Amino acid sequence: MEVPTLRQPASLAEDTGALVDQALESWTAILGVDHVSVDGRSRAAAETATFATTHTVPAIVRPASRDELQECIRIANRFRIPVYPVSSGKNWGYGSRVPAADANVLIDLSRMNRILDFNEKLAYVTVEPGVTQRQLYQYLQARQSRLWLDATGSSPDCSLIGNVVERGFGHTPYGDHFAQVCGFEVVLPTGETAETGFCRFPGALTGAVYRWGAGPTLEGLFSQSNLGIVTRMTIWLMPAPEHFEAFFFQCNRNDQIAPLIEALRPLRLQGILRSTVHIANDYKVLAGIQQYPWQETNGETPLRPELMTGLRSRLKFGAWSGSGGLYGTRGQVAEARRAVRKALKGKVDRLQFLDDRRLAFASRFAKLYQLMTGWDLSKTLDLARPVYGLMKGVPTEQPLASAYWRKKSVPPPSMDPDRDGCGLLWCAPIAPMEGQHVEVIAELTNRILLEYGFEPSISMTLITERAVACVISICYDRREPGQDDQAMACYLHLQRELTERGYHSYRLGIQGMSEMNGPDGYGRLVRAIKDAIDPNGVLAPGRYQPI
Protein backbone atom coordinates (compact mmCIF):
# COMPACT_ATOMS: atom_id res chain seq x y z
CA MET A 1 0.00 0.00 0.00
CA GLU A 2 1.32 3.39 -0.98
CA VAL A 3 1.29 5.81 1.94
CA PRO A 4 0.52 9.50 1.23
CA THR A 5 3.50 11.67 2.02
CA LEU A 6 3.66 15.27 3.01
CA ARG A 7 6.80 15.84 0.98
CA GLN A 8 4.50 17.05 -1.84
CA PRO A 9 4.59 20.01 -1.45
CA ALA A 10 7.70 20.28 0.67
CA SER A 11 6.50 23.32 2.61
CA LEU A 12 3.66 21.32 4.10
CA ALA A 13 6.01 18.98 5.93
CA GLU A 14 7.94 21.98 7.22
CA ASP A 15 4.73 23.57 8.52
CA THR A 16 3.24 20.53 10.22
CA GLY A 17 6.27 18.57 11.35
CA ALA A 18 7.28 14.95 11.25
CA LEU A 19 4.50 13.87 13.62
CA VAL A 20 1.89 14.44 10.94
CA ASP A 21 3.80 12.17 8.56
CA GLN A 22 3.73 9.41 11.17
CA ALA A 23 0.04 9.99 11.83
CA LEU A 24 -0.65 9.80 8.10
CA GLU A 25 1.02 6.42 7.89
CA SER A 26 -1.23 5.16 10.67
CA TRP A 27 -4.40 6.69 9.19
CA THR A 28 -3.58 5.22 5.78
CA ALA A 29 -3.05 1.78 7.25
CA ILE A 30 -6.60 1.91 8.66
CA LEU A 31 -8.50 3.72 5.92
CA GLY A 32 -6.56 2.94 2.78
CA VAL A 33 -4.70 5.30 0.51
CA ASP A 34 -7.88 6.40 -1.32
CA HIS A 35 -9.35 7.88 1.87
CA VAL A 36 -6.40 9.96 3.07
CA SER A 37 -5.76 13.09 0.99
CA VAL A 38 -2.81 15.46 1.13
CA ASP A 39 -2.82 16.72 -2.46
CA GLY A 40 -2.87 20.45 -2.98
CA ARG A 41 -6.24 20.59 -4.74
CA SER A 42 -8.09 18.71 -1.97
CA ARG A 43 -6.47 20.77 0.76
CA ALA A 44 -7.14 24.05 -1.05
CA ALA A 45 -10.82 23.17 -1.39
CA ALA A 46 -11.02 22.32 2.32
CA GLU A 47 -9.38 25.65 3.19
CA THR A 48 -11.91 27.64 1.13
CA ALA A 49 -15.07 29.20 2.53
CA THR A 50 -17.48 31.91 1.42
CA PHE A 51 -15.30 34.52 3.11
CA ALA A 52 -11.56 35.01 3.60
CA THR A 53 -9.86 32.41 5.78
CA THR A 54 -6.23 31.73 6.70
CA HIS A 55 -6.39 28.38 8.47
CA THR A 56 -4.58 25.51 6.78
CA VAL A 57 -5.66 21.88 6.45
CA PRO A 58 -2.63 19.55 6.33
CA ALA A 59 -4.67 16.48 5.33
CA ILE A 60 -8.17 15.05 5.00
CA VAL A 61 -9.16 11.62 6.34
CA ARG A 62 -12.45 9.88 5.57
CA PRO A 63 -13.52 7.09 7.93
CA ALA A 64 -16.45 4.91 6.88
CA SER A 65 -17.54 3.62 10.28
CA ARG A 66 -17.57 4.44 13.96
CA ASP A 67 -14.75 1.96 14.56
CA GLU A 68 -12.57 3.61 11.92
CA LEU A 69 -13.36 7.03 13.39
CA GLN A 70 -12.37 5.83 16.85
CA GLU A 71 -9.02 4.67 15.53
CA CYS A 72 -8.51 8.00 13.75
CA ILE A 73 -9.09 9.84 17.03
CA ARG A 74 -6.74 7.53 18.94
CA ILE A 75 -4.03 8.21 16.35
CA ALA A 76 -4.63 11.94 16.69
CA ASN A 77 -4.08 11.62 20.44
CA ARG A 78 -0.97 9.48 20.00
CA PHE A 79 0.71 12.10 17.82
CA ARG A 80 -0.99 15.17 19.36
CA ILE A 81 -2.50 16.17 15.98
CA PRO A 82 -5.59 18.41 16.18
CA VAL A 83 -8.51 17.19 14.07
CA TYR A 84 -11.70 18.89 12.94
CA PRO A 85 -14.79 16.82 12.01
CA VAL A 86 -17.33 17.84 9.36
CA SER A 87 -20.39 15.95 8.14
CA SER A 88 -21.05 17.16 4.60
CA GLY A 89 -18.95 20.33 4.87
CA LYS A 90 -21.68 22.55 3.42
CA ASN A 91 -21.77 24.96 6.34
CA TRP A 92 -21.88 27.91 3.94
CA GLY A 93 -21.91 31.37 5.49
CA TYR A 94 -20.43 30.04 8.73
CA GLY A 95 -17.11 28.60 7.55
CA SER A 96 -17.92 25.68 5.21
CA ARG A 97 -15.30 22.98 5.95
CA VAL A 98 -12.61 25.31 7.29
CA PRO A 99 -11.53 24.45 10.87
CA ALA A 100 -11.87 26.99 13.66
CA ALA A 101 -8.09 26.86 14.28
CA ASP A 102 -5.02 26.50 12.09
CA ALA A 103 -3.35 23.26 11.02
CA ASN A 104 -6.22 20.89 11.87
CA VAL A 105 -6.51 17.64 9.93
CA LEU A 106 -10.03 17.44 8.55
CA ILE A 107 -12.11 14.37 9.41
CA ASP A 108 -14.72 14.09 6.66
CA LEU A 109 -17.66 11.94 7.86
CA SER A 110 -19.56 11.84 4.55
CA ARG A 111 -18.78 8.12 4.03
CA MET A 112 -20.65 7.34 7.25
CA ASN A 113 -23.98 7.56 5.46
CA ARG A 114 -26.10 4.65 6.63
CA ILE A 115 -29.74 4.83 7.67
CA LEU A 116 -29.54 2.46 10.61
CA ASP A 117 -33.16 2.14 11.70
CA PHE A 118 -36.60 3.27 10.57
CA ASN A 119 -39.97 2.92 12.24
CA GLU A 120 -43.09 4.01 10.38
CA LYS A 121 -45.45 3.46 13.32
CA LEU A 122 -43.43 5.41 15.85
CA ALA A 123 -42.24 7.94 13.25
CA TYR A 124 -38.49 7.96 13.67
CA VAL A 125 -35.30 7.27 11.77
CA THR A 126 -31.78 6.65 13.07
CA VAL A 127 -28.93 7.94 10.91
CA GLU A 128 -25.19 8.48 10.67
CA PRO A 129 -23.65 11.93 10.07
CA GLY A 130 -23.19 11.48 6.33
CA VAL A 131 -26.92 11.02 5.69
CA THR A 132 -28.28 14.04 3.83
CA GLN A 133 -31.70 15.61 3.45
CA ARG A 134 -31.91 14.29 -0.11
CA GLN A 135 -31.00 10.76 0.94
CA LEU A 136 -33.63 10.63 3.67
CA TYR A 137 -36.30 12.19 1.45
CA GLN A 138 -35.65 9.62 -1.29
CA TYR A 139 -35.65 6.84 1.31
CA LEU A 140 -39.10 7.91 2.54
CA GLN A 141 -40.43 8.30 -1.00
CA ALA A 142 -39.20 4.85 -2.03
CA ARG A 143 -41.12 3.34 0.89
CA GLN A 144 -44.24 5.41 0.16
CA SER A 145 -43.96 6.56 3.75
CA ARG A 146 -46.58 8.82 5.31
CA LEU A 147 -43.82 10.54 7.27
CA TRP A 148 -42.20 13.90 6.51
CA LEU A 149 -38.75 15.10 7.41
CA ASP A 150 -38.24 18.75 8.31
CA ALA A 151 -36.02 20.26 5.63
CA THR A 152 -33.90 23.39 5.76
CA GLY A 153 -33.50 25.83 2.88
CA SER A 154 -29.75 25.28 2.60
CA SER A 155 -29.14 22.36 0.23
CA PRO A 156 -30.60 18.87 -0.23
CA ASP A 157 -27.07 17.54 0.22
CA CYS A 158 -26.52 18.98 3.69
CA SER A 159 -26.12 16.57 6.59
CA LEU A 160 -29.11 15.98 8.87
CA ILE A 161 -26.93 15.52 11.96
CA GLY A 162 -24.70 18.45 10.99
CA ASN A 163 -27.68 20.79 11.02
CA VAL A 164 -29.08 19.38 14.26
CA VAL A 165 -25.84 19.83 16.19
CA GLU A 166 -25.74 23.46 15.01
CA ARG A 167 -29.34 23.75 16.30
CA GLY A 168 -30.69 24.66 12.89
CA PHE A 169 -34.34 25.02 11.98
CA GLY A 170 -36.77 24.31 9.19
CA HIS A 171 -40.39 24.88 8.23
CA THR A 172 -42.86 22.34 9.67
CA PRO A 173 -44.14 21.87 13.25
CA TYR A 174 -40.88 19.94 13.73
CA GLY A 175 -38.89 23.01 12.70
CA ASP A 176 -36.84 23.30 15.92
CA HIS A 177 -34.51 20.48 14.97
CA PHE A 178 -32.69 19.93 18.25
CA ALA A 179 -36.06 19.48 19.99
CA GLN A 180 -36.86 16.48 17.75
CA VAL A 181 -33.89 14.19 18.37
CA CYS A 182 -32.63 11.67 20.92
CA GLY A 183 -30.42 8.61 21.32
CA PHE A 184 -26.98 9.98 20.47
CA GLU A 185 -23.93 7.81 20.00
CA VAL A 186 -20.82 9.94 20.45
CA VAL A 187 -17.12 9.33 19.90
CA LEU A 188 -15.32 11.27 22.62
CA PRO A 189 -12.00 13.09 22.13
CA THR A 190 -10.10 10.10 23.54
CA GLY A 191 -11.67 7.64 21.10
CA GLU A 192 -14.07 6.18 23.66
CA THR A 193 -17.81 6.14 22.98
CA ALA A 194 -20.80 7.28 24.98
CA GLU A 195 -24.54 6.90 24.37
CA THR A 196 -27.25 9.19 25.67
CA GLY A 197 -30.70 8.59 27.12
CA PHE A 198 -31.90 5.02 27.45
CA CYS A 199 -29.58 3.94 24.60
CA ARG A 200 -26.81 3.49 27.15
CA PHE A 201 -28.65 0.53 28.72
CA PRO A 202 -28.18 -2.84 26.94
CA GLY A 203 -31.46 -4.10 25.57
CA ALA A 204 -33.39 -0.89 26.28
CA LEU A 205 -36.52 -0.61 24.12
CA THR A 206 -37.14 3.12 24.45
CA GLY A 207 -33.88 4.76 23.40
CA ALA A 208 -35.42 6.04 20.15
CA VAL A 209 -38.71 7.30 21.58
CA TYR A 210 -37.87 9.02 24.88
CA ARG A 211 -35.04 11.50 24.96
CA TRP A 212 -34.37 12.02 28.66
CA GLY A 213 -33.46 8.57 29.91
CA ALA A 214 -32.46 8.53 33.58
CA GLY A 215 -29.88 10.80 35.17
CA PRO A 216 -28.31 13.97 33.71
CA THR A 217 -29.14 14.59 30.06
CA LEU A 218 -26.04 14.94 27.91
CA GLU A 219 -27.25 15.67 24.37
CA GLY A 220 -26.74 19.41 24.71
CA LEU A 221 -23.04 18.94 25.48
CA PHE A 222 -22.49 17.71 21.93
CA SER A 223 -24.26 20.52 20.07
CA GLN A 224 -22.26 23.59 19.12
CA SER A 225 -19.26 22.17 20.96
CA ASN A 226 -15.95 20.37 20.58
CA LEU A 227 -16.69 17.77 23.25
CA GLY A 228 -17.46 14.81 20.98
CA ILE A 229 -18.40 13.62 17.49
CA VAL A 230 -22.01 12.44 17.05
CA THR A 231 -21.93 9.23 15.02
CA ARG A 232 -25.57 8.15 15.46
CA MET A 233 -28.77 10.02 16.17
CA THR A 234 -32.47 9.27 16.15
CA ILE A 235 -34.57 11.94 14.45
CA TRP A 236 -38.32 12.09 14.95
CA LEU A 237 -40.38 12.48 11.78
CA MET A 238 -43.72 14.19 11.29
CA PRO A 239 -46.77 12.13 10.28
CA ALA A 240 -48.32 13.64 7.17
CA PRO A 241 -51.47 15.50 8.22
CA GLU A 242 -54.90 14.87 6.78
CA HIS A 243 -54.74 18.33 5.24
CA PHE A 244 -52.04 20.92 4.62
CA GLU A 245 -52.43 24.50 3.54
CA ALA A 246 -49.83 27.23 3.16
CA PHE A 247 -50.43 30.93 3.55
CA PHE A 248 -48.44 33.75 1.97
CA PHE A 249 -48.66 37.39 2.95
CA GLN A 250 -47.19 40.71 1.91
CA CYS A 251 -46.66 44.10 3.57
CA ASN A 252 -45.94 47.04 1.30
CA ARG A 253 -44.35 49.31 3.92
CA ASN A 254 -41.28 48.75 6.06
CA ASP A 255 -43.03 50.04 9.19
CA GLN A 256 -45.59 47.20 9.06
CA ILE A 257 -43.14 44.65 10.50
CA ALA A 258 -43.76 45.47 14.17
CA PRO A 259 -47.60 45.22 14.01
CA LEU A 260 -47.20 42.03 11.98
CA ILE A 261 -45.09 40.38 14.70
CA GLU A 262 -47.60 41.51 17.35
CA ALA A 263 -50.42 39.90 15.33
CA LEU A 264 -48.60 36.60 14.77
CA ARG A 265 -47.30 36.07 18.31
CA PRO A 266 -50.69 35.14 19.87
CA LEU A 267 -51.26 32.62 17.09
CA ARG A 268 -47.96 30.92 17.94
CA LEU A 269 -48.51 31.06 21.69
CA GLN A 270 -52.02 29.62 21.39
CA GLY A 271 -50.86 26.79 19.12
CA ILE A 272 -52.97 27.94 16.18
CA LEU A 273 -49.74 28.29 14.20
CA ARG A 274 -47.81 25.13 15.06
CA SER A 275 -44.95 25.61 12.62
CA THR A 276 -42.27 28.19 12.08
CA VAL A 277 -43.33 31.30 10.16
CA HIS A 278 -40.77 32.86 7.81
CA ILE A 279 -40.70 36.57 6.99
CA ALA A 280 -38.25 38.12 4.51
CA ASN A 281 -37.52 41.70 3.57
CA ASP A 282 -37.49 42.91 -0.02
CA TYR A 283 -33.75 42.38 -0.53
CA LYS A 284 -34.06 38.75 0.57
CA VAL A 285 -37.03 38.15 -1.74
CA LEU A 286 -35.35 39.80 -4.73
CA ALA A 287 -32.25 37.61 -4.25
CA GLY A 288 -34.58 34.60 -4.42
CA ILE A 289 -36.06 35.83 -7.71
CA GLN A 290 -32.96 36.97 -9.59
CA GLN A 291 -29.36 38.08 -9.31
CA TYR A 292 -28.23 41.65 -8.72
CA PRO A 293 -29.88 44.10 -11.18
CA TRP A 294 -26.63 45.33 -12.72
CA GLN A 295 -28.36 46.97 -15.69
CA GLU A 296 -30.82 48.98 -13.59
CA THR A 297 -28.04 50.22 -11.28
CA ASN A 298 -25.54 50.92 -14.09
CA GLY A 299 -23.13 48.57 -12.35
CA GLU A 300 -23.12 50.47 -9.06
CA THR A 301 -23.50 48.90 -5.62
CA PRO A 302 -25.24 48.73 -3.23
CA LEU A 303 -28.81 48.56 -4.47
CA ARG A 304 -30.36 51.63 -2.86
CA PRO A 305 -33.79 51.60 -1.19
CA GLU A 306 -35.25 54.12 -3.65
CA LEU A 307 -34.48 51.82 -6.59
CA MET A 308 -35.71 48.82 -4.65
CA THR A 309 -39.12 50.51 -4.33
CA GLY A 310 -39.46 50.51 -8.10
CA LEU A 311 -38.36 46.90 -8.40
CA ARG A 312 -40.93 45.88 -5.79
CA SER A 313 -43.69 47.55 -7.74
CA ARG A 314 -42.68 45.99 -11.04
CA LEU A 315 -42.09 42.48 -9.70
CA LYS A 316 -45.13 42.46 -7.37
CA PHE A 317 -43.59 41.80 -3.97
CA GLY A 318 -43.62 43.76 -0.74
CA ALA A 319 -41.29 45.42 1.70
CA TRP A 320 -41.92 42.31 3.82
CA SER A 321 -43.16 38.95 2.55
CA GLY A 322 -43.89 35.86 4.59
CA SER A 323 -45.20 32.33 4.64
CA GLY A 324 -46.39 29.69 7.06
CA GLY A 325 -48.14 26.34 7.10
CA LEU A 326 -51.40 25.04 8.55
CA TYR A 327 -51.48 21.34 9.49
CA GLY A 328 -54.21 19.05 10.80
CA THR A 329 -57.62 17.75 9.89
CA ARG A 330 -59.62 19.70 7.33
CA GLY A 331 -61.67 21.18 10.14
CA GLN A 332 -58.60 22.21 12.13
CA VAL A 333 -57.02 23.82 9.07
CA ALA A 334 -60.24 25.67 8.25
CA GLU A 335 -60.43 27.03 11.80
CA ALA A 336 -56.74 28.04 11.74
CA ARG A 337 -57.27 29.74 8.38
CA ARG A 338 -60.08 31.83 9.84
CA ALA A 339 -57.90 32.79 12.81
CA VAL A 340 -54.98 33.80 10.58
CA ARG A 341 -57.24 35.82 8.31
CA LYS A 342 -58.75 37.63 11.30
CA ALA A 343 -55.41 38.31 13.00
CA LEU A 344 -53.74 39.67 9.86
CA LYS A 345 -56.67 41.81 8.71
CA GLY A 346 -55.38 45.37 8.37
CA LYS A 347 -51.81 44.22 9.14
CA VAL A 348 -50.93 42.91 5.66
CA ASP A 349 -51.70 44.12 2.16
CA ARG A 350 -52.09 40.70 0.62
CA LEU A 351 -52.95 37.32 2.13
CA GLN A 352 -53.30 34.16 0.07
CA PHE A 353 -53.91 30.54 1.02
CA LEU A 354 -52.61 27.72 -1.12
CA ASP A 355 -53.11 23.95 -1.09
CA ASP A 356 -52.25 21.26 -3.64
CA ARG A 357 -55.44 21.82 -5.64
CA ARG A 358 -55.06 25.61 -5.84
CA LEU A 359 -51.36 25.31 -6.72
CA ALA A 360 -52.13 22.97 -9.63
CA PHE A 361 -54.95 25.27 -10.81
CA ALA A 362 -52.73 28.38 -10.66
CA SER A 363 -49.96 26.62 -12.58
CA ARG A 364 -52.39 25.52 -15.28
CA PHE A 365 -53.81 28.99 -15.89
CA ALA A 366 -50.71 31.15 -15.24
CA LYS A 367 -50.33 32.18 -18.88
CA LEU A 368 -54.02 33.05 -19.21
CA TYR A 369 -53.80 35.08 -16.01
CA GLN A 370 -50.84 37.02 -17.45
CA LEU A 371 -52.81 37.83 -20.60
CA MET A 372 -55.73 39.10 -18.53
CA THR A 373 -53.82 41.11 -15.90
CA GLY A 374 -50.31 41.69 -17.24
CA TRP A 375 -48.86 39.99 -14.14
CA ASP A 376 -46.51 37.10 -14.87
CA LEU A 377 -47.89 34.75 -12.24
CA SER A 378 -45.47 32.00 -13.31
CA LYS A 379 -42.55 33.86 -11.69
CA THR A 380 -44.45 34.09 -8.43
CA LEU A 381 -45.24 30.38 -8.62
CA ASP A 382 -41.59 29.56 -9.36
CA LEU A 383 -40.70 31.27 -6.09
CA ALA A 384 -43.63 29.85 -4.14
CA ARG A 385 -43.26 26.18 -5.13
CA PRO A 386 -39.95 25.52 -3.34
CA VAL A 387 -41.20 27.30 -0.19
CA TYR A 388 -44.47 25.36 -0.37
CA GLY A 389 -42.49 22.15 -0.74
CA LEU A 390 -40.25 22.94 2.22
CA MET A 391 -43.35 23.27 4.38
CA LYS A 392 -44.13 19.66 3.38
CA GLY A 393 -40.61 18.38 4.01
CA VAL A 394 -39.38 18.47 0.41
CA PRO A 395 -35.72 19.61 0.14
CA THR A 396 -34.84 22.12 -2.57
CA GLU A 397 -31.76 23.75 -4.06
CA GLN A 398 -33.62 26.93 -5.01
CA PRO A 399 -32.62 29.10 -2.00
CA LEU A 400 -28.93 28.30 -2.56
CA ALA A 401 -28.99 30.35 -5.77
CA SER A 402 -29.21 33.52 -3.65
CA ALA A 403 -25.54 32.99 -2.68
CA TYR A 404 -24.78 34.02 -6.30
CA TRP A 405 -26.58 37.37 -5.83
CA ARG A 406 -23.59 39.59 -6.70
CA LYS A 407 -22.03 37.24 -9.28
CA LYS A 408 -22.14 38.41 -12.90
CA SER A 409 -22.61 34.93 -14.29
CA VAL A 410 -25.62 32.70 -13.73
CA PRO A 411 -25.44 29.98 -11.08
CA PRO A 412 -24.17 26.70 -12.55
CA PRO A 413 -26.38 23.58 -12.57
CA SER A 414 -24.25 22.13 -9.77
CA MET A 415 -23.94 24.97 -7.29
CA ASP A 416 -20.93 25.20 -4.96
CA PRO A 417 -20.56 28.65 -3.37
CA ASP A 418 -17.04 27.85 -2.09
CA ARG A 419 -15.73 26.76 -5.47
CA ASP A 420 -17.47 29.56 -7.35
CA GLY A 421 -16.16 32.46 -5.27
CA CYS A 422 -19.49 33.45 -3.75
CA GLY A 423 -19.14 35.77 -0.78
CA LEU A 424 -21.52 34.99 2.06
CA LEU A 425 -21.43 35.81 5.77
CA TRP A 426 -24.37 35.05 8.02
CA CYS A 427 -25.19 36.82 11.24
CA ALA A 428 -28.00 35.13 13.19
CA PRO A 429 -29.31 37.09 16.20
CA ILE A 430 -32.22 35.90 18.31
CA ALA A 431 -34.84 38.41 19.51
CA PRO A 432 -37.89 38.23 21.77
CA MET A 433 -41.04 37.96 19.68
CA GLU A 434 -42.07 41.58 20.09
CA GLY A 435 -42.42 44.15 17.33
CA GLN A 436 -40.09 46.67 18.92
CA HIS A 437 -37.20 44.20 18.88
CA VAL A 438 -37.49 43.21 15.24
CA GLU A 439 -37.69 46.90 14.34
CA VAL A 440 -34.39 47.54 16.11
CA ILE A 441 -32.67 44.66 14.32
CA ALA A 442 -34.05 45.73 10.94
CA GLU A 443 -32.95 49.33 11.47
CA LEU A 444 -29.45 48.35 12.55
CA THR A 445 -29.07 45.96 9.64
CA ASN A 446 -30.27 48.45 7.05
CA ARG A 447 -28.02 51.21 8.34
CA ILE A 448 -24.83 49.19 8.76
CA LEU A 449 -24.96 47.06 5.62
CA LEU A 450 -25.78 49.96 3.32
CA GLU A 451 -23.01 51.99 4.97
CA TYR A 452 -20.50 49.25 4.06
CA GLY A 453 -21.84 48.85 0.54
CA PHE A 454 -23.95 45.69 0.91
CA GLU A 455 -27.65 44.96 0.55
CA PRO A 456 -29.42 44.37 3.91
CA SER A 457 -30.91 40.95 3.23
CA ILE A 458 -32.97 39.83 6.24
CA SER A 459 -35.11 36.83 7.08
CA MET A 460 -36.99 36.48 10.35
CA THR A 461 -38.31 33.13 11.55
CA LEU A 462 -40.80 32.71 14.37
CA ILE A 463 -38.78 29.73 15.53
CA THR A 464 -40.57 29.11 18.83
CA GLU A 465 -43.66 30.53 20.50
CA ARG A 466 -41.60 33.31 22.07
CA ALA A 467 -38.51 33.96 19.95
CA VAL A 468 -37.59 35.21 16.50
CA ALA A 469 -34.45 33.95 14.75
CA CYS A 470 -33.07 36.53 12.35
CA VAL A 471 -30.63 35.55 9.62
CA ILE A 472 -28.82 38.49 8.04
CA SER A 473 -26.95 37.75 4.81
CA ILE A 474 -23.92 39.71 3.67
CA CYS A 475 -23.63 38.66 0.01
CA TYR A 476 -20.86 39.69 -2.37
CA ASP A 477 -18.44 38.47 -5.02
CA ARG A 478 -15.19 37.24 -3.46
CA ARG A 479 -13.37 37.83 -6.75
CA GLU A 480 -13.94 41.58 -6.53
CA PRO A 481 -10.84 43.19 -4.97
CA GLY A 482 -11.29 44.40 -1.39
CA GLN A 483 -14.72 42.82 -0.90
CA ASP A 484 -13.54 40.15 1.55
CA ASP A 485 -12.09 42.75 3.92
CA GLN A 486 -15.09 45.04 3.55
CA ALA A 487 -17.55 42.23 4.24
CA MET A 488 -15.71 41.05 7.35
CA ALA A 489 -15.53 44.61 8.70
CA CYS A 490 -19.28 44.91 8.10
CA TYR A 491 -19.97 41.62 9.85
CA LEU A 492 -17.88 42.50 12.90
CA HIS A 493 -19.52 45.93 13.19
CA LEU A 494 -23.01 44.46 12.89
CA GLN A 495 -22.29 41.67 15.37
CA ARG A 496 -20.87 44.13 17.88
CA GLU A 497 -23.82 46.52 17.72
CA LEU A 498 -26.34 43.70 17.98
CA THR A 499 -24.71 42.11 21.02
CA GLU A 500 -24.31 45.47 22.72
CA ARG A 501 -28.10 45.78 22.52
CA GLY A 502 -28.65 42.26 23.84
CA TYR A 503 -29.28 40.39 20.58
CA HIS A 504 -26.86 37.49 20.60
CA SER A 505 -26.52 35.03 17.72
CA TYR A 506 -27.95 31.55 18.09
CA ARG A 507 -25.24 30.14 15.80
CA LEU A 508 -21.71 31.28 15.04
CA GLY A 509 -19.30 30.91 12.18
CA ILE A 510 -15.62 30.24 12.65
CA GLN A 511 -15.03 34.00 12.37
CA GLY A 512 -17.04 34.63 15.56
CA MET A 513 -16.12 31.77 17.90
CA SER A 514 -13.05 33.22 19.60
CA GLU A 515 -15.12 35.35 21.98
CA MET A 516 -17.61 32.59 22.78
CA ASN A 517 -16.78 31.69 26.38
CA GLY A 518 -15.59 34.34 28.78
CA PRO A 519 -14.29 33.98 32.34
CA ASP A 520 -17.80 33.56 33.76
CA GLY A 521 -19.22 30.44 35.39
CA TYR A 522 -20.45 29.05 32.08
CA GLY A 523 -17.09 29.49 30.40
CA ARG A 524 -15.19 27.96 33.30
CA LEU A 525 -17.52 24.96 33.40
CA VAL A 526 -17.23 24.27 29.66
CA ARG A 527 -13.45 24.65 29.86
CA ALA A 528 -13.28 22.24 32.81
CA ILE A 529 -15.31 19.65 30.89
CA LYS A 530 -13.13 20.10 27.81
CA ASP A 531 -9.91 19.70 29.79
CA ALA A 532 -11.26 16.59 31.51
CA ILE A 533 -12.41 14.69 28.41
CA ASP A 534 -9.88 16.01 25.88
CA PRO A 535 -6.61 16.17 27.84
CA ASN A 536 -4.52 16.45 24.67
CA GLY A 537 -6.74 19.13 23.13
CA VAL A 538 -7.01 17.30 19.82
CA LEU A 539 -10.71 17.68 18.97
CA ALA A 540 -11.68 20.84 17.09
CA PRO A 541 -9.70 23.40 19.11
CA GLY A 542 -11.41 26.78 19.00
CA ARG A 543 -14.84 25.48 18.01
CA TYR A 544 -17.33 27.47 20.14
CA GLN A 545 -14.52 27.94 22.64
CA PRO A 546 -11.42 30.16 22.85
CA ILE A 547 -8.14 28.34 22.31
Image (tube, rainbow, N blue to C red):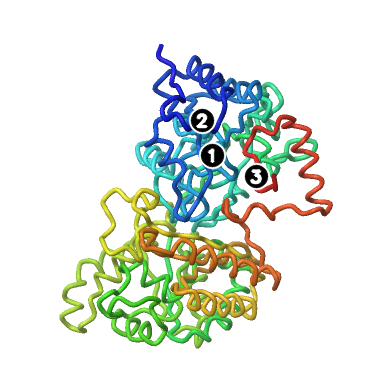
Q: Position of residue 37 (x, y in %)?
A: 43, 28
Q: Say which residue label 3 marks.
A: 542
- Residue kind at label 3, given as amino acid type: Gly
- Residue kind at label 2, given as amino acid type: Asp
Is residue 73 visible in the rendered image? The answer is yes
- Marks 2, 3: nearer the viewer: 3
> Which label's residue is closer to the chain start, 2 or 3?
2
Query: Nearest the camera: 462 or 543?
Result: 543
Picture quadrant of residue 368: bottom left
Q: Say which residue label 1 marks.
A: 124
Q: Quadrant of the N terminus?
A: top left
Spatial CA span between label 2 and label 3: 34 Å
Q: Are marks 2 and 1 in contact (CB under 8 Å)?
A: yes
> Which label's residue is closer to the chain start, 1 or 3?
1
Q: Residues within 10 Å of mark 1 (few under 14, many from 20)?
A: many
| Picture layout, residue 176 above or below residue 379 | above
Q: Residue furthest top?
A: 1
Identity of the residue drawn at 64% across and 72% down: 497
Q: Residues within 10 Å of mark 2 (few under 14, many from 20)?
A: few
Identity of the residue drawn at 37% across and 76% down: 301
Q: Say which residue label 2 marks.
A: 117
Q: Are marks 1 and 3 in contact (CB under 8 Å)?
A: no
181 sits to left or right of 418: right
